[in-house]
Image (cartoon, coloured by chain):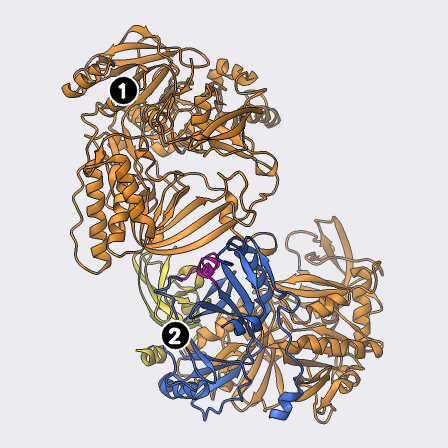
Chain colours: A yellow, B orange, C blue
Amino acid sequence: MLRIPCPFCGLRDHTEFVYLGDATIEYPPLDASEEAWFEAVYLRKNPRGRHFERWQHVHGCRAILIVERDTLTHEILGARLAHGPTAEALA
Amino acid sequence: MTGYRLDEGGAIERSEQRRFSWDGRAYHGFAGDTLASALMASGERILARGFKYHRPRGVMAAGPEEGGALVTLGEGARREANAKASQIELYDGLKAFGQNAYPNVRFDLGRVNDLLGAFFAAGFYYKTFFGISGKGTWEWMQFEKIIRQAAGMGAASTEPDPDAYDIVHAHCDVLVVGAGAAGLAAAEEALAQGLDVILAEQDFALGPALLGAEGAIEGEDTAAWRTTRLRALSRARILPRTTAFGLYDGNVVGLYEKVTDHLAKPDPALPRGRVHIVRPRSVILATGAIERPFAFGDNDRPGVLLASAVETYLRRFGVAPAKSLALTTNNDRAYDTALTAAKAGLKTTLLDVRPVPPEERLATAKAAGVEVFTGHVPVRVKGRSGVEGLEIGTRNQAGEVTPTQTLYREAVGVSGGFSPAIHLVSHRGVKPVWHEEMACFLAGTPPEGITLTGAAAGIFEREAAVAHARAVSEAEGQRLKGRRAEPPRTRPGGLGRIEPLWEVRVKGRKLKSFVDPQHDVTTDDIRQAAAEGYASVEHMKRYTTLGMATDQGKTGGVVGLALLAEALGQSVEATGITTFRPPYTPVPIGAFAGRARAAHWRPTRRTPMMEAQAERGAHFTDAGLWKRAWWFATGPADTLEAAYPREAAAVRNTVGLVDVTTLGKIAVQGPDAGEFLNRVYVNGFAKLPIGRCRYGVMLRDDGLVFDDGVTWRLSENEYLMTATTAHAGAVLAWLEELLQTRWPELRVHVASTTDQWAGVALAGPRARTVLEKAMAEGDVSDAALPFMGLTRAEIAVEGGHIPALIARISFSGERAFEIYVPSGWGDALWRRLTPLVEREGGAAYGLEALGTLRIEKGHVTGAELDGRTTLEDAGLGRMASTKKPFIGAVLRQRPALTEAERPRLAHFEPVTEGERFYTGAIVCHPERIEGHGLGWITGVTLSPAFEGRWLGIGFVAGGHTAWADTELIVADPVRGQNTRVRVCDPHRYDPKGERMHG
Amino acid sequence: MAEMLDLRPPVRSALAGHLSPRTLGQIGADGPGVRLYEHPFASLWQIAAWPERLGAAAALAADIALVEAAPGPGRAIAGSRATLLRVEPLKWLAVSDTPLAPPRTDGEATVLDLSHARTRLCLEGPARRDLLACLTAIDLRARHFGHGRVATTAIQGSAVTLACFGEGVELYVLRSFALSLWQHLLDVGAQFGVDVVHQAERRQAR
């Protein structure tokens, strides 16, 4: 069982969350080139070790988190709110 | 001779008799007995038959490592196969049966297999997959049935499990697994530090190995020490009958607690068992060690036990396996057993493979009257249905054995060393490390938060184990308080000098020596596997099935791999051990389901109108988690097939009422809400006036259609979005993702209001009449509420007025209104409208008729928007704005998504009236009825609007215009039918929308 | 406004027909392990803040409930007009037994009426935490989830907000799931001995 430290709710089982994919992807503007969109939507690295991922706490505070996870050991190294302004407001 | 109860001793309650039955005959034992100890005390020796050879088997152990006494418990739906007699707590009324034998375990016709041993050697089963020489697969299949009959274990019940199970979540500071001396000490120490402690013990007694034990711990008499610890632990959560079956990521531990198995008359409200999912900050594994045997001739005969088991039966249960006992050992431990046995009055002989045992041990044994043979080993057991004697021999430095004589002893106790129970830490990926001196595998370095202590850490001397456990617990307590603490050093030891011994072989003698009695794997099988090239321990395991039975190789595993190593001429260390995987011991499969079965296998969502609908004859169907009215029966003889066309016709001719509460509803609020919707939907929302609705379609990033629905603008900064029932949750999550990750600057809040609003659609030419009659306040005339308009009104119901939001929206193609009220009044709304609808000659309609209406009108639903559909495919291409960018705008332009030949939405009509076809069928050209064809059917209905004919909706390459003059075939290979169809425009019902707008 | 409210018919409970007082399982000499009842509220408003104006929204929420300060993450406070629960980073719920008028926000926050979207189930009795431990994975130990604590978690696959007040735990459940969850509580709770009581009786007993 992965346990994710939600900055709002505290440490929770991963079953309360939904995985939303690679958090390092920057989505281009809506009218960007097809190449830019293709890259953002389809191309993924498969890193070994530390990785940033998006998880949404759907059965909790509904916040989307940036979770740092070691893909090799499954160790969760930390989590923060994805929404910058909200993270600042709570800090 | 066989086992008997000693006149005194043991931690059993001799005043509390327990009556039970074995193979239909009445027996009794005492409170504190196991089934194994009670049967042993009753003189029963043959309790089971072997897996392949049907050789008689008896009790071999006193715990989960039991390899012989596998029995079936209970009857009917509660029949449980392969239970280990040595783990079953005795209770009044217990019924146990022998298994894998006919007619019974004492006289089994299957024993003939023992004579055919050569045919059942390792790999036999796999080899036969290649077919029987010269014959084909059919012959093999017949043969297989016979083998499966003959070889096997007990038969599980085929009835549904009648018991309930709970999954219980727990949190604590320290979880101690195992309540032996080390576990008790560790738990006590953690508790003393103010920590929150859970202590789990697989046995029904805490400190089971301390029961009946002599000597002292920490200067206190053993029994008193145990009592003191239990008193100190009263504040901890103690779980007896609870096995830690797995250790997982995040150091989460799975426990299985037997709640009622030991009770004669359990409270029916109690679950049979509980899976505890424990999230401890620290796990202390005090799981002990399991003795292992070594192999010699016919070492599976009833009466051959592990030496430590002999001691347990004598001390804890006051039972002797026989009047005379031969113990055989390669370490110091069995000397204690010998003393116990001699003291209990057994004629006791000890064979020590070591030529020179420790002098003091030797002297004590001899003084107690134990006959000791040093440098001796057992060669072969005499006796077919149980031990009658033991042929022994000398063993020289080179390991060569010379038989010398036969000792007429009726039980044999074997000690070949111990395997620390490191299974749980291995589940976390910690590799076992071979300890040469102790001749056992110890755990490698565990991750933070897991520690091993006691015999599990290789510390076999009790005083040292207790001291280590206290030190470990103290260090963990300090760590949890954020202080640095040096963990104590672990010094394995306490067994004396072990002389590794895996098998006794005699030159020129053929012995049948078992490594895994549960799966009938012999030493020859392992050598055969090695000879055939199965050089990896994992391959050998699968080829011989060593360690794949219910005990998972707890005793024989190490012996088997050592023999493999020997056969390959390499070290045990280099050979390694197979990976331990959960569960440590079997867990009923129902326990993992917990309460999630039958009515609770998933939650049910109900609309507020469900009860009123049921009263009106509604039949319900599942739509995701929701129950939705499917059709309304007018009488007991009514059918779905008769009802839905009638309901659909009512909508077309007069008026119908349908519950649309399940639609996803999302509040979109804030000054940037309009801009947000404008980016999410393909069509423009920036200029949607207040009090108006608009149908919108949203795409995914990849340009394919995600969902559709109508969004209502309630005020300047507030919108109500609707989403399909199926996608409601996903749409909300998607909007949240966009707001939190892509457009953090937008001032928009979204929230689900699905449960806040109950809704109905009132559709048909007489819809307005009904609505006007129901309203106390409001105006729904064409002028006040045009098509796609929105208004607020008051509906008069019994007891008062309810506020309603009314939108002029149509899914059916008729003049229609969607009416939403706060859901606490949904029942009142339905009850108010139904009689009004019926008075106009209309009817309530269900999901099936809703489907009919939308197929006729050519509206898409989840059946069409399946994640592969583009806007153009769905016939919605014109909706896409060219004036603004939106999600999916770029990738939807990719060539493969814009080809004219893509399957497009169409209507399909059978050429021959009365013929029908089915959803899921494939649309083909008449000359090429093959493969994926030209398209597929997504919905079929009997259509009142099209002269009562069958009508299908689906996709066809190029759309209906490409096939205007060509008949196609709807092929249904599953039903074996082909139907000639015409392809039509899906939007031909009231194409100008006069009925909706009128 | 008041006249309009008087015209409103009674709100129908999502558990209507299932609330009759009864006991399940064995009730020991010390009374039931769990006491269970529905405690419906009149109003439930969501107050959502803009991140940079979190303080202003908190003040607004405090005004609605008549409390000194709106609660922080994971906390709840009972005010004289409403109880405030902090449920999301930017959101509070204001729950009241008497109808709350739509709050004025002046653009400092958004408010949303969810009075009919949920109901409130109350669990009391010595085994309440044991029963909840069969349903949810969160840490319910008193020192982690005591008086004034709030947590949203998954029960049976749907999100439920739990609040602890004194010797009781309140479950804010979505209306459509309420009956399913109620039946689940009864089935699992029977092993502890459940007493289903009327809310009115409970409030008198307090």
The disc placed on residue B739 is none
Quarter where residue B609 is shown: bottom right
Q: Which chain is disc 1 placed on?
A: B
Q: Amino acid at mark 2?
A: Arg
Magenta span contains residue B748: no
Q: Relative to the observer, which residue lies in front, C68 or C203?
A: C203
Work out whether B394 lies above or below A23: above
Q: Is residue B9 visible?
A: yes
Which residue position holds label 2?
C75
Work out whether B157 lies above or below B393: below
- Residue at mark 1 to residue at mark 2: CA–CA distance: 64 Å
Q: Is residue B704 visible?
A: no
Q: Relative to the observer, which residue lies in front, B148 or B321?
A: B321
Q: Secondary structure at mark 2?
A: loop
**Image location of residue B163, percent across then percent down:** 56, 45
Which residue position holds label 1?
B338
Q: Which chain is disc 2 placed on?
A: C
**Image location of residue A34, percent across then percent down:** 45, 73
Q: How many marks?
A: 2
Marks 1, 2 in one chain: no
At horizontal 26% and vertical 20% (from top left) the residue drawn is B339
**Image location of residue C132, percent across then percent down:** 47, 60
**Residue bounds of the magenta highlight:** C125-140
Quarter where residue B842 is shown: bottom right
Which quadrant holds the C terminus of chain B?
bottom right
Please, what is the dominant secondary structure of the magenta stretch? loop
Work out whether C10 lies above or below B479: below
**Image location of residue B312, percent across then percent down:** 34, 28
At horizontal 61% and vertical 24% (from top left) the residue drawn is B139
**Which residue is the extreme one toward the top?**
B405
Magenta span contains residue C136: yes
Which quadrant holds the N terminus of chain B?
top left
